[in-house]
Every structure is written in C-alpha cells, then in structure tokens.
Image: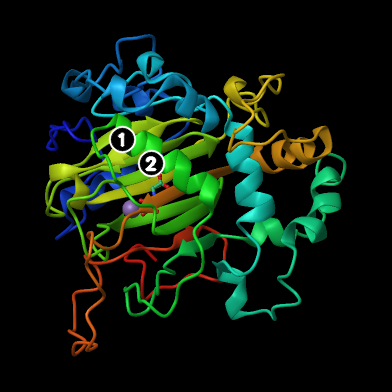
Amino acid sequence: MGKMAAAVGSVVTLAAEPGEDAFRKLFRFYRQSRPDSSDLGAVIDFSAAHTARGTGPDARKVIRSQLSVSSVSDHDAHRAGLQPVSKWQAYGLQGYPGYQWHWVKQCLKLYSQKPNVCNLDKHMTKEETQDLWEQSKEFLRLKEVNKRRPRSLLEKLRWVTLGYHYNWDSKKYSADHYTPFPSDLAFLSEQVAAACGFQGFRAEAGILNYYRLDSTLGIHVDRSELDHSKPLLSFSFGQSAIFLLGGLKRDEAPTAMFMHSGDIMVMSGFSRLLNHAVPRVLPSSQGEGLPCCLETPLPAVLPRDSVVEPCSEEDWQVCTSYLKTARVNMTVRQVLAIDQDFPSEPTEEKKRDITTEGFCHLDDENSQVKRAKLNPDS
Ligand code: OGA
Ligand code: MN
C-alpha cells in the first residue's frame, strides 16, 4: 500500500507485556478482539462508501491514489476478469476484481494440484495428495448437514507455492525448484501491476494462504525475493480479515485495516519491506454467510480470449461451502530483476534472527501442525 504512513497512536487498552513491542501488542489485541464490538472501531474500512472510513485515528491516513488508467485496456482488464481500471478505487491501493469465483475455484481445484507444492506434501504421498478437490468435494457438500464430520483434505490445506517454490526452511527461492507459474494468475497480476505503474512485472512466485476462522499469520517481512523494487501483490477472497501494516522495525505500532473479499493489496516502494501480519479472520456477521460480492451470478458473456473461465454450478457449490468458514489469500511476487540470476555459489548460510525475518506460516489455534520455529507467535 504505497502511500500509507505507518505509525499510529493506538486506542488499545491491553497492557503491554514486559519487553513486548508495539506490533506484537496490537497483534494480541486484534487476535482477541470480539468481532462485533467496538474493538474494531479503529480498523480502516476501505469498503465504507467512497471515502475510506473508519472512526479511529488511522482513518485520516487513507489517501486516494491515482491509477495508470491508460496502461491497461478495458479489454485486457475484462480478459483478466477485472473491471475497467477507471472504475477501480485505489487507496494507497485497492481494487475490485469482478470474477472472484474464478480465482477461488483455481485456488481450491487447480492450483492445489501437482506439480505445485503444498503443506500436506510433508506428511503424505503424491498419490494421497493427487487430487484434493475430488477427494474433498463430497465432504464439503455434506458440511451443512453434518458439522461433526472429519475435516476434508481441502480443509487441511494451509499453503500452496507456485513458480519458484519458496523454501520455508532456507527462506530462499532457487533456480532448480521451479514449475510453470499459472498463466491466468500471471496475466491478472501483470494487469494489476501495470495499472499501478509497474509495467513489465513478472509473476515468478506465488504463495497461496488458506485460512480457517482461527488461523493467524504471524508478524513478518517478505524479503526473500531478490528484487525489492518490484511490488508484491496480494488478493483476498472469502471471509474478511484484519491486516496489520507496521513499520520497518517491529517497535513501530501497526495500522489496522480490513481486507475484504476482492480486495487487492499492492506492497511497493517503501511499504514493500514493512512488517505485516494477519491476527484475525472475522466470521461473517450472519454466522455462515458469504460476502455479497461472491454471491453475484456468473456473468453471461466472457470475452473470446478471456483468461477466466465459467465455473459450473456444482463447482461453485463446493467453493461456497468451503468459503463460509475460510479466507483464501494469493500473493504474487517477482523474484528476480530482469537479467538477474540466482547466486551460483550457495553463500554460507547466515544465522539470522528468525523472529524478525522471512515468512511465517499460518498458525491455527487448535492445530498440532504449528511450526514453532518459523512462527514467533506460537
Ligand atoms: C503473505 C502475506 C497476507 C494476507 O503471504 O506473505 O502477508 O493477507 N499474506 O494473507
Ligand atoms: Mn507477507
């Protein structure tokens, strides 16, 4: 979110634990907040009318941002399932993809398949993780009638990596761990990046996060890409979340904002290397509802060269059942600068402060699969 200032005077009454930094304090506050209470009054809500509102002091920090309308033709936007750039609303930056169902379906049905890598690979064979969608769809349809059923594989999916596959242990990408990046998601990303003034952006790596209502994403900076002059794009679907955007250091208090379904966050320039986290996924107010933007009927006409495809009624049923208690986030990164290569000699592994570097895994409250090593909050 290019133009957002970082520090805030917070309204939080929670006492800081000894030695606790400002980011961690707000992370705990939002993790514990009651979804329907005044606790959330200070969270910026970009979707509130055309003036990004929120009642807290952070609301004043929202700046309307100009997009490069002429960089993306209405036709290319349409091909990517997006509205014309002239209709987007950008604050620091934010946009509205029209055809969210396509990306949700891809995340659940296609991108979760081999050769992409996912969290389940560590514990299961290739055959067992072959087709999570096929194995889970009947389970998900039964979700309404049988809440006490065992969790399906798709519901155990936490992350998928695309393109240059991020290595969670070494915190690196490498030339020899690459599979083709999905062309539809690359096209979407190129249009969004271009509209933000980043012509020639290349989608080289993706991390897809699958959140349950009790999932959190710990405080981290995405610094493993080798070219930080390129933006990081983040697309959110399903249930809303609270996103905390902090400073370069953890002792700067973060700004809280909602990420709703269809929101696109672009972290570029100064904000490319800021601390951030997701302390909370918010259950929909109706209990098990879907954001209305996901209930829109499928469009009748797609351009002939569209990269988004129609989604069958049957597939969408599985997706909506899943999304009633979930959030899906796709992040897209350019790893290398033009003409850049990975360092040929694997440089001596530096011992880093793992609590402030690299990524954090999703962390579920009741899960046994925490990776304490990588997540400072577990
Ligand atoms: C990430 C990330 C944020 C989100 O994957 O690096 O910060 O909104 N995701 O889920
Ligand atoms: Mn991140």
219 left or right, relative to 34: left
Mark 2 touches mark 1? (CB < 8 Å): yes
- CA gap between label 2 and label 1 equals 6 Å
Residue 135 to residue 128: above or below: above
User: Element at badge 2?
Assistant: helix
Tell which of 200 and 270 is nearer to you.
200
Percent position of residue 347, x then y: 19, 87
Circle 1: residue type: Ala
Picture coordinates of residue 74, whole percent (x, y): 44, 20
Label 2, residues with CA under 10 Å away: few <14, some 14-19, many ≥20: many
Numbered label attached to residue 289: none
Relative placement, left or right, of 3 versus 69 is left
Q: Is residue 277 above or below residue 259?
A: below
Tell me the element at label 1. Answer: helix
327 relative position to 358: left or right: right
Q: Quadrant of the C terminus?
A: bottom left
| Residue 243, placed above or below residue 166 | above
Beta carbon of the mark 1 residue lies under 8 A of ligand 1: no
Quarter location, residue 343: bottom left
Give the image quarter of residue 84: top left
Density class for disc 1 (Cα within 10 Å; few <14, some 14-19, many ≥20) is some
* Residue 97 horizontal/vertical position (percent): 49, 28
Quarter of the figure with the N terminus: top left
Please tell me whether residue 320 is drawn above or below residue 214 in the rendered image: above
Res 190 label: 2
Amino acid at the residue labelled 2: Glu
Task: Please say whether residue 32 is visible from this viewpoint.
Answer: no
Instruction: Name the residue nearer the viewer: 273 or 179.
Output: 179
Q: Nearer the viewer, residue 8 or 333?
A: 333
- Report the disc number at residue 194: 1
The residue sitting at 23% across, 59% down in the picture is 338
| Residue beneath the point at 52% across and 57% down | 365
